[in-house]
Image (cartoon, grey):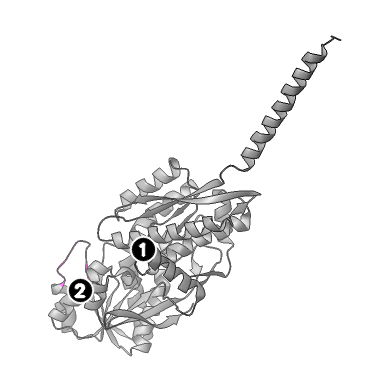
């Protein structure tokens, strides 16, 4: 045993106390550090004709993330977390969509993927997400292939087969149409599937399809197809196409003397005010019909309008719900990882979102209703809903 003078012992004790204090201080600082971060990747078109839809998605995601972070409610495994949204522009292109997904998954460290919005882009990204075991939720992709045979891919929207059947029933039973015609983009899985399902169901109901015309993406003159349709004198023209095509088609249909009911699909959701004015008196399906009597919808609409000085559309509402579903999944599993998000999403039942109640049962397709809108004096008005 060695002997240490009293002065040296006191100096050593003082240093030890200081060291303990510093360690305690460091521990306190660690406990008060910024919350952990959960990164969500969002793939949306920020350029081109689909840019308005992309802007809606980005704004809605930012709004929901801000609300979650400000509430401080994301406490997982005893630790506080905040959400981040990393946005990639897919330029409404399948190849760009896959590249964006690879970047977000492999380089940006995301825990879940939101989007792409439309089926032609969502389908190839869904294949990649499934292979990477990355949970993906598309706000508005409606084609069956997006989720078919996949455990990690979900959607907030209804599927095309259900929507196509609902639209054909509306045409036959509610509008009393016996003879209908269809004009669709054969190069797009979304348009093509809706057209085929509508035709099959309409025939099964006892109706007649007098014209089944197609075109390919990028065409602007549809007069030849519309003239052929006009000669069959249908009571309704079904246009399961995106706004930039549908508006031209309605205008050209009237040019060639085709006077009948016009019916569109949820692709019309992002149509501009000028577009709705051009398709006045038409009907279309939608994935979200704002209910002013619902507190959640009213708060969302007011917050969106205040933040961006514009009204939200269905893409905005469904993207907002998509982020909300991920948050719900995180909380149910009490852990911040991709597998937890996937498992939590698969177990969601009766989630109350902006677009009503939503449940997942054994696959990524939700059980929810579809609304039918009528354009009156250039403004879409809620007409009725079809429930599975």
- Nearer to us in this view, 93 or 234: 93
Q: Residue lying furthest front in this view?
A: 7
Q: Hey, which residue is sitting farthest right in the picture? A: 1
Q: Main secondary structure of the magenta part?
A: loop
**Residue at (25% x, 87% y) in the render:** 235
Q: Which mark is residue 249?
A: 2
Q: Quadrant of residue 255?
A: bottom left
For the point 33% across and 62% down, the residue is 53
Q: Secondary structure at mark 2?
A: helix
Q: Residue at x 62, y 55 (%)?
A: 333
Q: Whole-Å distance between the Cαs marked 1 and 2?
A: 31 Å
Q: Is residue 256 left or right of residue 45?
A: left
- Front in this rendered view, residue 64 or 360: 64
Vertical arrangement, residue 33 with respect to residue 195, above or below: above
Image coords of residue 241 (percent x, y) = 28, 69
Quadrant (top left/top right/bottom left/bottom right) for the N terminus = top right
Range of residues picked out in magenta: 213-222
Looking at marks 1 and 2 on the same chain, the residue that comes earlier in the sequence is marked by: 2
Q: Which quadrant of the view contains residue 51? A: bottom left
Q: Secondary structure at mark 1?
A: helix
> Residue 308, labelled with which disc?
1
Asked whether 384 or 291 is in front, the reply is 291
């Amino acid at each position: 045993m060695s002997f240490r003078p009293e002065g040296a012992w006191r100096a050593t004790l003082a240093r030890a106390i200081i060291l303990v204090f510093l360690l305690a201080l460091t521990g306190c600082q660690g406990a008060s550090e910024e919350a952990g971060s959960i990164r969500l990747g969002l793939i949306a078109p920020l350029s081109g004709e689909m840019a308005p839809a992309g802007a809606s998605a980005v704004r809605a995601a930012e709004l929901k993330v801000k609300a979650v972070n400000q509430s401080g409610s994301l406490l997982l495994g005893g630790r506080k977390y905040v959400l981040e949204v990393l946005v990639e522009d897919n330029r409404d292109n399948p190849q760009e969509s896959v590249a964006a997904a690879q970047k977000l998954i492999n380089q940006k460290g995301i825990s879940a993927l939101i989007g792409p919005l439309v089926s032609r882009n969502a389908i190839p990204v869904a294949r990649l997400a499934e292979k990477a075991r990355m949970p993906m939720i598309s706000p508005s992709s409606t084609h069956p292939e997006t989720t078919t045979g996949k455990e990690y891919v979900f959607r907030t929207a209804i599927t095309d087969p259900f929507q196509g059947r609902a639209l054909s029933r509306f045409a036959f039973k509610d509008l009393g149409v016996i003879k209908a015609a269809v004009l669709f983009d054969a190069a797009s899985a979304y348009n093509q599937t809706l057209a085929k399902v509508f035709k099959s169901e309409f025939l099964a109901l006892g109706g007649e399809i007098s014209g089944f015309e197609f075109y390919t993406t990028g065409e602007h003159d549809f007069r030849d197809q519309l003239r052929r349709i006009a000669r069959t004198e249908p009571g309704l023209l079904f246009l399961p196409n995106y706004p930039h095509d549908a508006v031209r088609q309605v205008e050209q249909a009237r040019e060639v003397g085709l006077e009948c009911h016009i019916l569109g699909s949820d692709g019309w959701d992002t149509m501009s005010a000028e577009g709705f004015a051009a398709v006045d008196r038409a009907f279309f399906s939608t994935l979200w019909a704002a209910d002013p009597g619902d507190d959640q919808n009213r708060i969302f609409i007011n917050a969106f309008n205040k933040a961006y000085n514009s009204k939200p559309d269905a893409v905005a509402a469904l993207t907002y719900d998509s982020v909300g579903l991920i948050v719900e999944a995180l909380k149910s599993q009490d852990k911040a990882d991709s597998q937890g998000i996937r498992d939590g999403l698969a177990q969601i039942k009766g989630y109350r979102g902006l677009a009503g109640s939503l449940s997942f049962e054994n696959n990524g397709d939700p059980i929810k209703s579809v609304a039918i809108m009528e354009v009156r004096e250039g403004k879409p008005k809620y007409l009725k809903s079809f429930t599975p």
